[in-house]
Amino acid sequence: MATLGGSNVSELNNRPVITQTKTNFRWWFSVALWVLLLVSYIDRTNISIAGPSMIKDGVVTPAALALANSLFLFMYGLSNIFGGFLSDRFGPRKIALVALTWWSLMTLFTGVIWSSAALILSRVLLGLGEGMHWPLNSKWVKSWFPAHERARANMFWEFGLTMGPIITGPLVTWLIISTGTWKTPFILLALIGIIIMLPIIWKIAKDRPEESKYVSKEELAYIQAGRQDEVTGSVVSVGEVLRKWDFWLLLINWSGMATVFYGILFWLPSYLMKVRHLSLHMTGFWYMLPYILMTICIILTAFASDKLMKRSIFASIGTFIAGIGLFLGTHSGNLVLAMILISISSAMNGVVLPTIWSSLQRMFPSQNVGAGAGLLNGLENIIAAVGTYILGISFSIGFPYLIIFALIGGISGLILAKRGY
């Protein structure tokens, strides 16, 4: 059996000899992955803006909305796990087509819900489809990019995570206000997924660059020369993964940041309206700020991380700042200062994201990177679901929980950095 990547592997020596290619289709492919995640994140985050309107119309209760968001994350986490194994078994392209179709239909279902029970069911089913997405992208990056480009490749598709909420705030707010109903955003976005994204993925997404007619021989040789960092051997079992301390350190670090991120993602609008007493219009504006800053963080971190070939030190510092920023922001009496600090806290996800996934892609062999990504992101989302639910029930209890978890995640990242990641 293979073992997970050791910390004594020097990635700095794994640079390809070939420096020129006739095509750079791998980067265009990463743009397609970005758009796919963009659609996915708008589909899942529109509930943050539409949720208060659902409650106001008497369609759902606040408790049901909190439960629906947490169950979404829980199902999303489980779906990550088996989605990763399915992508290793059948290839990411087939699973992506099925997942995209499924979550688009479930987005449409959310747009016609009639009760709290229907909302909870729609969010559970949405999580089932969307959870397969992250391990697919990680498997694609492992196959399509040499080691020294992977943080930047992860940066490209992770732009969907930051741009999704940036677009969600003003777009969903405008659609609700202009049409007079919270149903419009769900119906429109479901149609975008089915009519636009399905043909794109069908046309250009291949499991490996060797299968793409758009990749030249020179580009393929360049990619293959940069795969020297891959862990070789046979399939790694789940038991081997779960017995590896490095995996658990990575999971705790990622969960600390994700708990903060998802808490802000799902509950910032409600916090601003209930605690800060802002209007829906102003809430949509402030909702964008964390993700604008996160986009900047992703770009800077990806380039710096690929240059220095250091991953976990970035993830650790980012998670510490997330916890400290959230503490200061929720205790500030000044709205502008509070929003800047909370936005910085959420933006640190842009520091953690490209480095966490680059470490994961180094840690697992090609045969198992989908399963490894599924386990990491799946368990992380299940863990984050707890914090999201607590925050939805009580801001006074939820925010301290998020802050403490972030600090624990930062410590875990420091230990992982000391182990060479």
Image (cartoon, grey):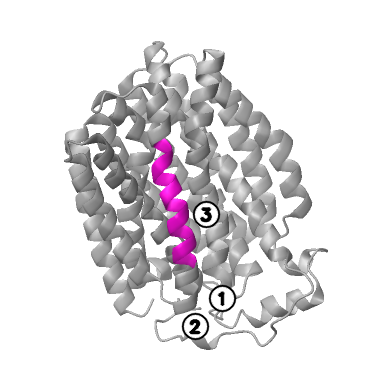
Task: State the mark number for residue 11.
Answer: 2
Q: Amino acid at mark 1?
A: Ala
Q: Which residue is mark 3?
A: 158
Q: Is residue 99 left or right of residue 134?
A: right
**Image x and y of residue 367, in percent:** 59, 69
* Residue at (46, 55) in percent of width and height: 296
**Image x and y of residue 77, in percent:** 44, 47
Task: State the mark number for residue 147.
Answer: 1
* Residue at (58, 57) in percent of width and height: 137
The residue nearer to you, when weighing 99 against 407, is 407
The residue nearer to you, when weighing 131 against 188, is 188
* Residue at (47, 20) in percent of width and height: 118
Give the magenta range.
287-302
Q: Is residue 107 visible?
A: yes
Q: Alpha-carbon neighbours of circle 1 within 10 Å: few (<14), some, or many (≥20)?
A: many
Q: Is residue 295 magenta?
A: yes
The residue nearer to you, when weighing 114 against 349, is 349
**Image x and y of residue 378, in percent:** 43, 52
Disc 2 to disc 1, how far (Cα)?
A: 8 Å
Q: Is residue 127 left or right of residue 101?
A: left
Mark 1 lies on a secondary structure that is helix
Disc 3 to disc 1, how far (Cα)?
A: 17 Å
Disc 2 to disc 3, how far (Cα)?
A: 22 Å
Q: Are marks 2 and 1 in contact (CB under 8 Å)?
A: yes
Q: Amino acid at mark 2?
A: Glu
